Image (cartoon, grey):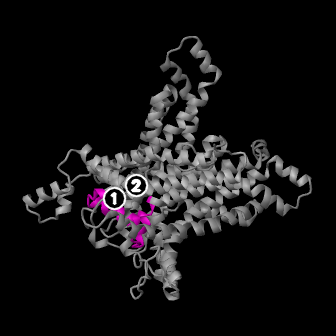
Amino acid sequence: MRGSTREFAMGSALFRRQDGRLVAGIVIVGMFVTMAVAPWLFTSLDPAGLNLEARLTPPSAAHWLGTDATGNDIYTRIVYGSRTTLGTVIAVLAIASLFGIAVGSLSGYAGGWLDGLLMRTTDVFLAFPPLILALATNAVLGRGLRQTVFAVAFLWWPAYARLVRGQILALREQEFVESARVIGASRLRIIRHMLPNVIDPVIVRVSLDAGFVALTAASLSYLGLGAQPPTPEWGRMVAEGQMFLLDQWWVAAFPGIVLFILVVGFNLIGEALGDRIGQPYRESRVAVPGTAKEKN
Amino acid sequence: MGRYIARRLLQMVPVLLGVSVLTFALTNLLPGDPARAAAGRHATPQQLEEVRERLGLDQPLPAQYAMYMGRLARGDLGTSLTSRQSVAEELRLFFPATLELLLATMLIAVGVGIPLGVLTAARRGRWADRAFLGFSYFGVGMPVFFTALLLQIFFAGWLGWLPIAGRLGLATVPPPAFTGMYTVDALLAGQWTTVLDALRHLLLPALTLAIAGGSEVGRITRRSMLQALDEEYVRTARAKGVPERTVWLRHALPNAMLPTTTVIGLQVAFLLGGTVLIENIFSWGGLGTYAWTGIFRLDIPVIMGITLLATTVYLFVNLGVDLVYARLDPRIRYG
């Protein structure tokens, strides 16, 4: 035991700090995942009832974080709200990254006019003002959680398409791909050889994006587009609590703080992983064509 | 360089075309009937048909798009379906408000972020560094709508130092319009009390956005400073006996500014269309508010106008970032 701690302590200062971030991030996100999977471990109350007698009571032993305007226990709604938020983040990133991988590998491998067309399409998406795109998409699809998921994923896929395309272009010149081509492997088979090498940067990117996706989705909900009541959603809860801000501060404050904690958890993981493969700290979702970054 | 800029300007055309097609498609997919939105709730079926015909909404979509682009080519952004005002005129009204907010935000974010990044890099591992890193997690991770509420409670609710929302106090007459930015216009007109009032209104929304932006700018500056100080040329400079101050400011800082420039460009890009939330919370009548109402009133020309304007500015900001890159790093040559 002693030996292992010594060894650990002997690692470079950078490495130790990175691991601290990773552990802290995993603990935070893990806690919310547990809440989402097994909310009954944390609370025995109903997140979406109606109990007007108990409306807007301050934090107490019975209601740890107080109650909201419908008399629901805020702590309970926060616990169940982790389901909404984590579900949204996972769905958005799954859709965006899978679609991005498909488009990016097609573009990178096919080259030629198809590559040109697909990349110009991503240019258009990346140049579009993001929040306006999300708002318009969400308005087209209608209010609701699933609609918000698609609206946010619509915003994020081009970043993945470009990332994957860049990886594929770099990999195409590598020896193992060359050898596969020489022995007459089919195109599909070659792409299958390449994909595992693309996955690492995508995973890092996902971890870097997760917090920002959570914030974007919560913002749309805050504006009233995302999850509809009675589904508990943190951004929406902040919006609902806003009118009681000065007197019943707990209604808006706690959901906001919890969202913040989750985002920090995601960011800690993202930064630790990003440092490990040398990916710069969250370069946001944008990588613009013809910028110096690509030229260097 | 001139040829490079010309080529970049040409490249903007297809992107703008694509954005216009995407916006046009999206807005026409919005649930509801734009003719009804334009004609008003109490229009008779006959009036509705008249409006539809007058606005060309009875034409097939490609024809409508062609009509719009034809007018756009002549510099006409069309007329708002709901307010019946010229969209260009309304943009001239709303855009300066957003620009003012954006400039104030970036002024704080860059003015505080870069020095903080450099200073904390110099104090790596000390308490100031740790305090800033801790704060930056807070800045980057806080939902802006929540930061906004906290600042409103604290500065407007409890302390009562700053107004909670709006661009000017009720008693204040807007300064003569020149740029459309109240602070600048009031300054130009020499109306000092108006300047002060506009600044007091500007402070909270700008601070809200700058906490997030400045944290990011500070972090990236700190990080790239540390990276730059690790480079060989810094060792060479030190070995030559260059004073430490010069090493930092003349050798490391310009190189560290490259990633910072990227982040600043991204921030501006994000803020262009991303102030919807803040404008909503602070009743800031800018582009975001205009977009929000446009989307929900099915005002197609309005949405088109906003996205085209925001995208154009965004593309120019990008070009600017690349030109700054070339200045900072002589190895980068465009031609």
* Left or right relative to A163: residue A139: left
Residue identified by numbered label 1: B77
Whether residue B288 is in magenta: the answer is yes
Residue B138 is at least partly visible in this image: no
The x, y position of residue A243, in whole percent, is 36, 74
**Magenta-colored span:** B273-302
- In the depicted view, which residue is nearer to us: B10 or B61? B10
Read off the chain for label 2.
Answer: B
Residue B184 is at least partly visible in this image: yes
| Residue A125, disc | none
Which residue is at a point 77% across and 46% down the rendered structure image?
Answer: A12
Label 1 SS: loop
- In the depicted view, which residue is nearer to us: A26 or B206? B206
Quadrant in the rendering for residue B76: bottom left
The x, y position of residue A255, in whole percent, is 44, 63
Quadrant in the rendering for residue B177: bottom left
Q: Label 2 crowding class (10 Å Cα cut-off): few <14, some 14-19, many 20+?
A: many
The x, y position of residue B245, in whole percent, is 83, 63
* Secondary structure mostly taken by the magenta-highlighted segment of the chain: helix
Residue type at mark 1: give it.
Leu
- In the depicted view, which residue is nearer to us: B55 or B275? B55
Label 2 SS: helix
Query: Which dot, 2 or 1, sits closer to the camera?
Result: 1
Which residue of the protein is positioned furthest toward the top in this rendering? A183
The x, y position of residue A168, in whole percent, is 56, 30
* Left or right relative to A136: residue A273: right
Tell me which numbered mark, 2 or 1, is placed earlier along the sequence.
1
